[in-house]
Amino acid sequence: MNKTPQNIPGHLASFIGKVALKDQLIEHDLNPSELINQQYIESMPSMTKGLFKIICNRCGNQTRSLFGKIDCKRCDRTHSYCKKCIQMGRVLECTPLYKWIGPQFTYPPQMNACNWDGTLTNAQQQAANRATQSVIEHSNLLIWGVCGAGKTEMLFPAITKAIELGERICLATPRSDVVRELTPRFQEVFPNISLQSLYAGSENVFEGAQLTLSTTHQLIHYYHTFDTMIIDEVDAFPYHGDDMLPFVTHRSVKKKSTTIYLTATPRKEDVTDMRNGKLPFVFVPRRYHGVDLPVPTFQLSFNLQSSLQIGKLPPSFYQWLQQRTKKERQLLIFVPTISLAEKILSHTQEVLVKEKAALIEERVSFVHAKDDTRKEKVHKFREKQLDVLITTAILERGVTFPAIDVAIIDAGHEVFDEAALVQIAGRAGRSKHDPFGEVVFFHDGKSRAMVQAKKSIIKMNKMK
Ligand SMILES: [Zn+2]
């Protein structure tokens, strides 16, 4: 359990290790000047403005078009504000931000905190040892493990070590589905460690928890507070291509800290850094069960677009359905857009039942990022209460379903880049009881990404 620093009134707990706006402090009946006098917080400018540059110091936004102007009533002048992080309260040029500089939560060292009794493969063990060493040395490491390498299990020893050292730990991942999937697992593996899960709308918020599972976005609230930071899917949208996320992640860790990056599909820049020795890394080339990654088959469907336009899947899909080797496997169907999924849903339900891929039409469902029942549907699929789940790219990574076949409809569509295709293929065959899922890309013209994805899967299968 955590210990609130001594002599700090309990109502301050929710600001320990955080960055806050003035309004947020006032909402809690706190007086910023008093807290400054008590040396709990320090003010910092909310924006840095140069001749050509403007930076929001809460989220790191530097894009000019993402700043607005507003007439400020307090100072009777026009001021800039940041549009990018406005959902978390408005950052206004004339109002400072406050960062916590007082004592942090402390955690008594705990030995043998890990309750996991599984065994790591040699390759996993090697990666786990390196990660543990990084925690001891407070150095950084990238773990590059193929989809299904068992990255979560590899982290347990390093997290156990961090707990032994009384550290505060965070695992950040781009998707809230992954936070929800990992929460019960971590609770089981570390039963005596306080844990919170952070994503927009999450309920399991426990200030000062020793272990935080979080979407990367939520790190915006933290300031120099974590000793060990694990960043899952570092190559993935939205960490990649968004300056805000590296900025807030970097700020959320203590000066002396460990960062462990995880990826199955490293971006070119990372590969270059690894080759040049700039980024220490360890590679886990095999899935934990030792069976190769499933190599996707390409299924050319000339009438793909015309079929989809009338709300049907192409005939080649139905032929494949009839020939599937293991019909009892669940089926995950990826589509490029929400509108397409909506269009094909009812016909697809009918056919899947006819071809015995689903028991009844209600056991075929569709999920997308803006779906309010997304959480429930993913849970139902995992619990095998659904036979088929049609999804947009939101389920491309992180989530694990034990025994599924995977189909992509219109795999040549631009939303499916190489990394996405490798990740999607990697959803199949993850269970040691059924390590051979089928992966089929239906297309009406191979894209470069498809060809590259297949190549890179074959290449990874050869690395041992
Ligand atoms: Zn901002």
Image: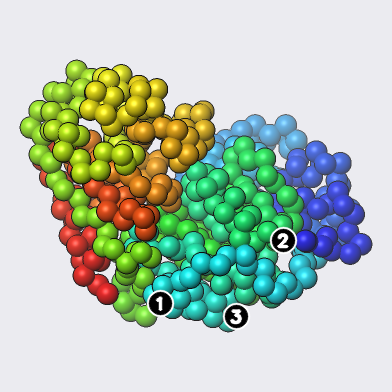
**Position of residue 128 measured from the top left corner of the image (x, y, whole percent):** 49, 74
Q: Amino acid at mark 1?
A: Asn
Residue under label 2: 192
Q: Is residue 165 above or below residue 309?
A: below
Q: Which badge, 3 or 2, comes first in the chain's sequence?
A: 3
Q: Residue 317 at what x, y percent from top left?
A: 17, 33
Instruction: Name the image quarter holding residue 123.
Output: bottom left
Q: Is residue 352 above or below residue 205?
A: above
- Residue picked out by circle 1: 122
Q: Secondary structure under badge 1?
A: helix
Question: Disc 1 versus disc 2: distance between alpha carbons?
Answer: 28 Å
Specify how the rendered protein is coloured.
rainbow
CA separation in Å, label 3 and label 1: 21 Å
For badge 2, the amino acid type reads Asn
Question: What residue is shown with label 3?
Answer: 136
| Left or right: 439 as drawn, with respect to 301 | right
Q: Quadrant of residue 143?
A: bottom left
Q: Is residue 301 left or right of residue 151?
A: left
In front of the other: 332 or 233 = 332
Q: Nearer the viewer, mark 3 or mark 1?
A: 1
Name the secondary structure under disc 2: loop
Q: Is residue 296 left or right of residue 241?
A: left
Q: Residue at x 73, y 37 (%)?
A: 75
Task: Give yes or no for contact between labels 3 and 1 (Cβ–Cβ under 8 Å).
Answer: no
Residue at left offset 50%, top offset 79%: 129
**Does label 1 or label 2 sit earlier along the sequence?**
1
The picture places residue 384, in percent across and down from the top left corner, at 43, 37
